[in-house]
Amino acid sequence: MKTTDLNLLTNCWRKAVPLMVSALLCCGMSQAQSSKAVIDGIMQEETNNSQLEKLAHELFDGIGPRLVGTPQMKQANDWAVAKYKSWNIDAHNEKWGEWRGWERGISHIDMVSPRVKSLEGTQLAWSPGMGKKTVSAEVIILPDLADSVAFQQWLPKVKGKFVMISMCQPTGRPDYNWQEFALKESFEKMKAERTAATDAWRKRISKTGYTSRTLPVALEKAGAAGILTNNWSAGFGVDKIFGAYTKIIPTVDIALEDYGMLYRLSESGGKPVISMHTESKELGVVPTFNTIAEIKGSEKPNEYVMLSAHFDSWDGGTGATDNGTGTLTMMEAMRLLKKYYPHPKRTILVGHWGSEEEGLNGSRAFVEDHPEIVQNLQALFNQDNGTGRVVNLSGQGFVEAKDYLTRWLAAVPDTIKNRIKTNFPGQPGGGGSDFASFVAVGAPGFSLSSLNWSYGSYTWHTNRDTYDKVVFDDLKNNAILAAVMAYMASEDPAKTTNTKTEGIKWPVQVKATRRGGLDK
Ligand SMILES: [Zn+2]
């Protein structure tokens, strides 16, 4: 705080050279007031005129999820650039690589025997489409066979069948629900049975001689009609939706309730038949982008403060909290900064990264492509663990982070900063999100880490990561925090240093994958 005040005086000094000491003091005061004006302005604007709900609706409901290589990802890149331009902020899409182009189409899945029931299912990302075809076929379970020889003998039986390759969960109730209501012995018994069933299923897969990655391809080659999976996310009605490995036949996640029903019917000899029609498009090789926006520095344009959040998502839901909320937090922070701090001392950048989900690729590429920015980075603030208000900030192993982060946090309104636990010097993040791409090269990247709001089970990579899970009050809190931290980092008279704490093993830089999802 002290250093900042001193700096405000120093700034004034240049303008106030011909004036007397009393005038100087006066000027110092007006600068202090202007700092207060910036922060108050940011607070007032976000409290009374937040754009977060509008942005969330446009991005999550209008454009939807942002899987790398999909037209929706590009649409979101273009939407963000247009949004920044409407706020008079320079922005552009910067190509960093290429990916398999794919677009999700419609899907209809019904059980048609022994009775009719529409099923809740989601094509995995990159699942091959069925064209205009609808296939009705029996559902069978991957059997428990002695070894890979027995599996090869059985394999021809999959021809024309839908094959279930996930275990049947013993309960669709999350553990917290059992904890609350079950008899202690029932809960213990269920957990023991589930652990045994999970182990047995793992063995069942490995005895085929394949892995969960290669098994779907083996079944496809043997003529299966499609692959059914269930990747339950340990909450009510929630599944994680990742990518398919099949090249010709569809791979579909069936929600736990329906998956269990089909499984039990098949097991009891009920020969369930489902009818499936899924569509998707292969779009060849497409370019992939980061969206970068900038408010140019007026005194030290070649030093940088960065806001950061990955823009891409998995596509079972709409990527609302992973990482739509981080994205919108940083967009809103930029809007606040442009309005109340239009001439920053240092250049303020925001990076909306592509393909974080496949390995921090957009941010790793940016670090490789922009040494001039990375070497002159004052600080970077990334947010990527859900919709919650920020409650943790680590110094990432940098010796002086404690000094400057504490100084900057001091300017953040009490209601926001008092909830934040700091950890200095902390450990350098080796992954998890895009700040790690910067930390790996010794640049001061920090994670604004959120309260979890059941992120891991209910929204992270799930089919329920949607608009309704966003907690806008917490998001407003985070937009104010990001804006004020960027403001303080920009104003700080001192350039941050990147001294690493001795004795800490530092993560190593990993190269970006510049061409992904393609065979060659
Ligand atoms: Zn994420």
Image: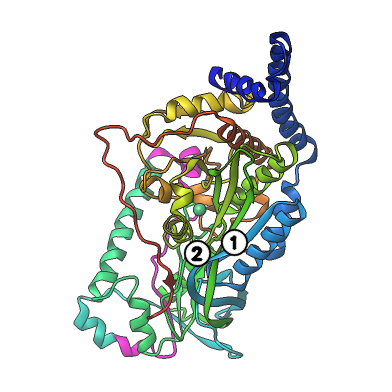
The kind of residue on which mark 1 rests is: Gly
Residue drawn at the location 32% of the way across and 53% of the way down: 195
Which residue is labeled 1 in the image?
A: 317
Q: Which comes sooner in the sequence, label 1 or label 2?
A: 2
Q: Secondary structure at mark 2?
A: loop
On screen, 232 above or below 191? below
The label shown at residue 429 is none
- Left or right for 154, reference 179: left
Dividing the picture into quadrants, the one containing residue 342 is top right
Tell me if residue 349 can be seen: yes
Residue 313 placed where, x, y %?
54, 60
Magenta stretch, residue numbers: 155-184
Location of the C terminus (image quadrant): bottom left
Give residue 241's mark: 2
Decide if residue 520 is on the left or right side of residue 119: left
Q: Is residue 339 left or right of residue 415?
A: right
Marks 1 and 2 in Cβ contact (< 8 Å): yes
Tell me the colour scheme of the image. Answer: rainbow
Residue at horizontal 56 percent and vertical 19 percent from the top: 1
Q: Is residue 505 magenta?
A: no
Q: Nearer the viewer, residue 498 or 170?
A: 498
Looking at numbered disc 2 in the image, what kind of residue is underneath it?
Ile
Q: Confirm if mark 2 falls within 8 A of ligand 1.
A: no
Q: Position of residue 89 (x, y in %)?
A: 70, 51
**Residue 295, image x and y in percent?**
65, 47
Residue 85, horizontal then vertical, whole percent = 73, 56
